[in-house]
Amino acid sequence: MLGALSDLDLRLIRVFLAIVDAGGISMAQGTLNVGQSTISTQLATLETRLGFRLCERGRSGFRLTAKGERFEALARDLIGAVEEFGMQARNMDRKLVGNLRIGMIGHTPFSENSRISHAIARFRKRDQAVRMIVTVCSPGAMEEQLMNGELDIAIGYFWNRSANLHFTPLFLERQVAYCGSKHPLFGRADSVTMDEAWECEWAWRSYPLPDSLFSAPPRHVTAIADNMEALAMLVLSGHHLAFLPQHFAQTYVRQGLMAPLAPRQLHYEVTFSVVTRQRRHVSEIARAFLDDLAMVHLETPPVVSA
């Protein structure tokens, strides 16, 4: 049974993960730059030190055993921790060292993406050795990940404002109702009444919207989606109406594939915010990035998207 880890053990574990990633011993030769017999010997040595078989290999192909699957997950965590330790140890003389985990909602307006990019560039000029991890997900998922400590910063719009989170407004985004070119209302989209629109089939967001937006929601919500691409697909089908960010829908409108539906009535604005946990829980790295983002918003005028 494997005892205290040695350099040899770490090397053998890396070989094992390379085999798994390649899908077999023979296919790992190019990655590891050694022959098949050497790789087989290294894998057998690791199994001997562990005291159990990691995989089945032979004519039937390569397949992890149940223990091999569990060991793979542990091995990836271990190697990730070793690499993180190495990065931080190498950069101890830097002022900011570690990870910055940022969550964003999909299809942020071009002008705001430009500002965020400027903030990243400004942050990278600091005395830092920070690995940025950027993910795109729904507002609900971002809120949950902030609360769990899986995200440091989130950028998006949020209806459920938890008292445990800190919200700083960034900008407003206009949402407009749209119909596709195959929809019966397309030819007179601009003159449609709200009552007519409300009688049609709608695609709605999977996350909650304010109840006060309209006096009553559509009667026929027959599709649910949590991202803009999915909503656009449903609109383009000609069977559903949906609210989309105006900047996002412009490309479809210019191509004649969508039209804004009663835009003077069927629209609303949402406030995008940068969100963190309460300030006492915000890391030094996240504070530095927030400072850079704030400075960019003061210094950089909005960029108008084409």
Image (cartoon, rainbow, N blue to C red):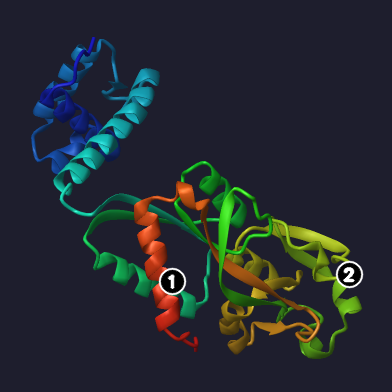
Res 17 → quadrant: top left
Q: Going 52% across and 76% down the picture, which residue do you hit? A: 109
Q: Secondary structure at mark 1?
A: helix
Q: Going 80% across and 70% down the picture, which residue do you hit? A: 213
Residue 139 is at least partly visible in this image: yes
112 sits left or right of 191 in the view: left
Amino acid carrying label 2: it is: Ser
Along the viewing direction, whichever of 218 and 25 lies nearer the viewer: 218
Label 1 sits on residue:
294
For residue 215, the mark is 2
Q: Are marks 2 and 1 in contact (CB under 8 Å)?
A: no
Is residue 299 placed above or below 280 in the rendered structure?
A: below
243 sits left or right of 306 in the view: right
Is residue 174 placed above or below 2 in the rendered structure?
A: below
Number of residues whose C-alpha sits closer than 10 Å to that of mark 1, classed few (under 14), some (14–19) or many (20 or more) = some
Is residue 113 placed above or below 160 in the rendered structure?
A: below
Q: Secondary structure at mark 2?
A: loop
Is residue 242 placed above or below 275 in the rendered structure?
A: below
* CA distance for labels 2 and 1: 36 Å
Res 182 → quadrant: bottom right
For residue 64, the mark is none
Residue 111 on image: x %, y %: 47, 80
Q: Going 39% across and 50% down the picture, which residue do you hit? A: 283
Along the viewing direction, whichever of 69 and 110 lies nearer the viewer: 110
Residue 114 is at least partly visible in this image: no
Along the viewing direction, whichever of 207 and 168 lies nearer the viewer: 168
Residue 72 on image: x %, y %: 33, 28
Along the viewing direction, whichever of 301 and 105 lies nearer the viewer: 301
198 sits left or right of 61 in the view: right
Q: Going 23% across and 9% down the picture, which residue do you hit? A: 1
